Image (tube, helix red, strand yellow):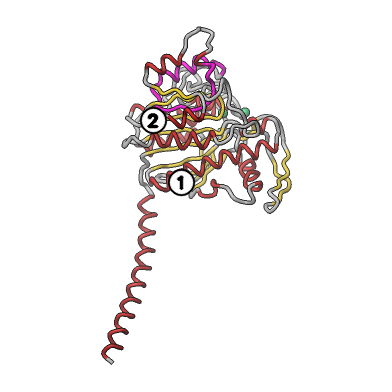
Amino acid sequence: MVIFVFLKKIMMSTGILIFLLAAGIITGNDSKAKDLCGKRPRNIVLMIGDGMGLAQIYAGMTANHGHLNIERFKYTGLAKTWSATDYITDSGASGTAMATGQKTYNNAIGVGTDSLPCRSILEYAEDNGLFTGLIATSSIVHATPASFIAHQKHRNMYESIATDLVNSGIDVFIGGGRNYFEKRSDSINLTDSLIIRDYQIAYDTNELKMCKPGKIAAMLANNHLPSISEGRGNMFSLALDKAIGILSENNKGFFLMAEGSQIDWACHANDTNNIILELLDFDKAVGKALDFAARDKNTLVIVTADHETSGLALTNGDFQKGWVEMRFASHQHSGIPVPVFAYGPGAESFSGFYENTDIFQKMMQLFGFIH
Ligand code: MG
Ligand code: ZN
């Protein structure tokens, strides 16, 4: 009888304990979610799918049997992409808008409508002691990455953009464009300058893998990297992993912009197969960034596009077969707003409908930078 009462007591208290634990866990989750609201990120990874509208994302999702890493984001918004001169932007003006907070003319790189330099979020990060990085699957001096690091009147000034890049003090850059550093009209070899500035130089992904902590200049192609269908392989995810590994050594934090450059080109070509391949390659790298952010808990990941390309419409599809039918309004960019996805501390501030220039303002505010 005594034993029975004793057992009953244990069962009751265990029951109570289990109940309290369950309640505790729920409360714990609630307070954690509340804690994250209004918290500032130490690191920001901004990922830009060039030309990636909602239809491109959903085409990739359908081809991948209904799933993408992009679905893991907690907050979504919409950004207007018009430029200072045109209803339909180019990648220079929209890159500059996100990088500097200024609406400017089409073809501008890091300059305002007056052609004067505007400081970029990457440069503010540098000023504040953070590590900085750029990744692209195009040449690294192409419009989107260039907008974050260079200040030139026209996107076609590739050699001047390369010079800006070398003088910028950026910690890691990975992309194509080797010729703009080494086979220049002024015969200057900028790689020599990079070596003097303590950069490790990588010309292929194996050399990139071997790089140790410190500065990295990876020029993995003479101009652009090949497309996925032409054999780019795992370069983008590898570059993202490597860059995050190096940049996260800084306790003060880092800013990294990583561009899936070639979604846009597949859309310009109205090439359904390549749209899906480039989108899925981008999404794979997004997964890597999200995995890091989930572990790190101090990293904000933002995924967006600079504009939509081709006015893509999905007219039929099948998740099971991974098949999707696409129709194109044009071979050019369109004016439709682009989605913005955010995960991590500060992600909630990316909900809503706003200008692409607000992406800069939000990042500045979350980093606590003054301008
Ligand atoms: Mg681009
Ligand atoms: Zn384009």
Residue 265 sits in quarter: top right
Across and down, in percent, residue 138 comes to 56, 27
Q: CA distance from mark 1 to mark 2?
A: 22 Å
- Image point 56% across, 20% down: which residue? 222
Name the residue type under label 2. Lys
- Image point 59% across, 32% down: which residue? 232
- Placement of 354 over or under 62, stated as above or below: above
Residue 251 sits in quarter: top left
What residue is shown with label 2? 212
Name the quadrant where ligand 1 sits. Answer: top right
Q: Which mark identifies residue 131?
A: none
Q: Nearer the viewer, residue 355 or 221?
A: 221
In this view, the mark in front (1 or 2): 2
Name the residue type under label 1. Asp
- Placement of 90 over or under 188, stated as above or below: below
- Image point 33% across, 30% down: which residue? 128
What residue is shown with label 1? 291
Res 264 seen here:
no
Across and down, in percent, residue 281 comes to 58, 39
Quadrant for the C terminus, please: top left
